[in-house]
Amino acid sequence: MAQAQEWAEVLGEPKLDEVWLQVETARLRKKTILPLDHVRLLHDWLDGKRKARQSCRIVGESRTGKSIACEAYFHRNKPQQETGKKPIVPVVYIQPPQKCGPKELFKEIIEFLKYRATKGTVTDFRGRTIEVLKGCEVEMLIIDEADRLKPETFADVRDFYDKLAISVVLVGTDRLDAVIRRDEQVYNRFRACHRFGKLSGGDFAKTVKVWEQTILKLPVSSNLTSKPMLKILLEATAGYIGRLDEVLRESAIRALTQGLKKIEKPVLKEVAWEYK
C-alpha cells in the first residue's frame, strides 16, 4: 500500500487530457437505447398484442438487438407505484437461466416483481406466481431467451395465457421455433410472429448516422456514412446492430486513446478486421 502511494506521488496527478479521456471512455461504454425505426415498429406491434391480450413470439438471429428492444419496451411502460398501494406493473421482462424448469421460471417472475419467492413445491411457486401477477395487474409477460426453457416449462407458459388472460411474448432465435413446434398446443398459442432482422441498405446507413451523432459524439465528425466507411462497417458487421454497436464504440475509444478527435479510416479498418 505504501509503495503504491509512493508510485502515485512520483507519477503525479493525471493530466487534464487523461481525465477527459477517462470520462469519454466511460461515456462510450454506457448502454444506450435509441428510438430506431425498426424498434418503433416492434413496440407498436407489441402495443397491439398487449391491448388485445394476444400471445406471440419475436424471432431473429443473435445480435440483431431483440433483447435491447424488448427491454426498452418494458422501460417505456414502467411500473406505477402509489403510497400504500400495490405496484401496478403493466409489462414484465425476464431472461430465464439455462435449462429453466417451472420452479426457476416462477422464481424469476416473482423476484422481478420485487416479491420474495416462497419456499416449497412447484405447486406452491405456481400459486404464488399467479397471485403476484394478478396483484400487480400484469398485462404482458416478455420471456427473452425463451429457448432456454425446458420442454415441460412451456405448459406453464401456456397456462399464463389461458388462466390469466395476459399477453405472453416468447423471444428467441430460430431455435425457439424448433422447440415450440414440437408441441402443437404451445405453437397454436404463439403463432403470431414478428421477425427482427438485420439492417441493410438505407436503414443501415441511417443507423450509422444516428450512432455517430447520438452515441459517439466525437469532437470532429468521422463521416461514417461515406461509401468507404460504410463498406468497412457492413463487411465487418453484416448488418447486425449488436456488432455495429461494438465496432463503433471500440473504434471511437481507440481513436481517442491515440489522440485523435475522430475515427480515422485506418482505425476503423483495424477494429473492423478483428470482427471478420
Image (cartoon, rainbow, N blue to C red):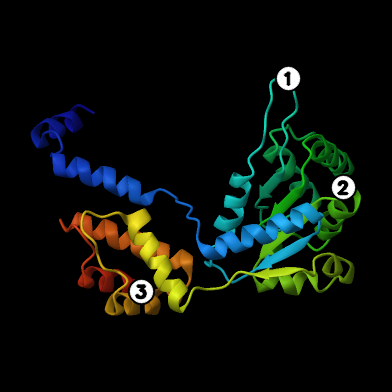
**Marker disc for residue 96:** none
The reply to whether residue 181 is visible in this rendering is yes
Q: Residue at x 15, y 33 (%)?
A: 8
Q: Residue at x 36, y 74 (%)?
A: 233
Q: Mark 2 is on which residue type?
A: Leu
How far apart are the two marked residues, 2 and 1, measured between alpha carbons?
25 Å
Above or below, comparing residue 141 to residue 6 in the picture: below
Q: Earlier in the sequence, mark 3 or mark 1?
A: 1
Q: Nearer the viewer, mark 3 or mark 1?
A: 1
Q: Earlier in the sequence, mark 3 or mark 2?
A: 2
**Marker disc for residue 164:** 2
The picture quadrant where one finds residue 155 is: bottom right
How far apart are the two marked residues, 3 and 2, measured between alpha carbons?
46 Å
Q: Earlier in the sequence, mark 2 or mark 1?
A: 1
SS under mark 2: helix
Q: Mark 3 is on which residue type?
A: Leu
Count residues near mark 2 (Cα–Cα under 10 Å), then give few for <14, some for 14-19, many for 20+.
some
The reply to whether residue 101 is visible in this rendering is no
**Marker disc for residue 84:** 1
How far apart are the two marked residues, 3 and 1, measured between alpha carbons?
52 Å
Count residues near mark 1 (Cα–Cα under 10 Å), then give few for <14, some for 14-19, many for 20+.
few
**Marker disc for residue 233:** 3
Q: Mark 1 is on which residue type?
A: Gly
Q: Residue furthest top?
A: 84
Image spot of residue 159 (x, y percent):
88, 53
Q: Residue at x 21, y 61 (%)?
A: 262
Image spot of residue 47 (x, y percent):
70, 55
The answer to whether 229 appears left or right of 92 in the picture is left
State yes or no: discs 2 and 1 in contact (Cβ < 8 Å). no
Image spot of residue 40 (x, y percent):
57, 59
Tell which of 161 and 34 is nearer to you.
Answer: 34
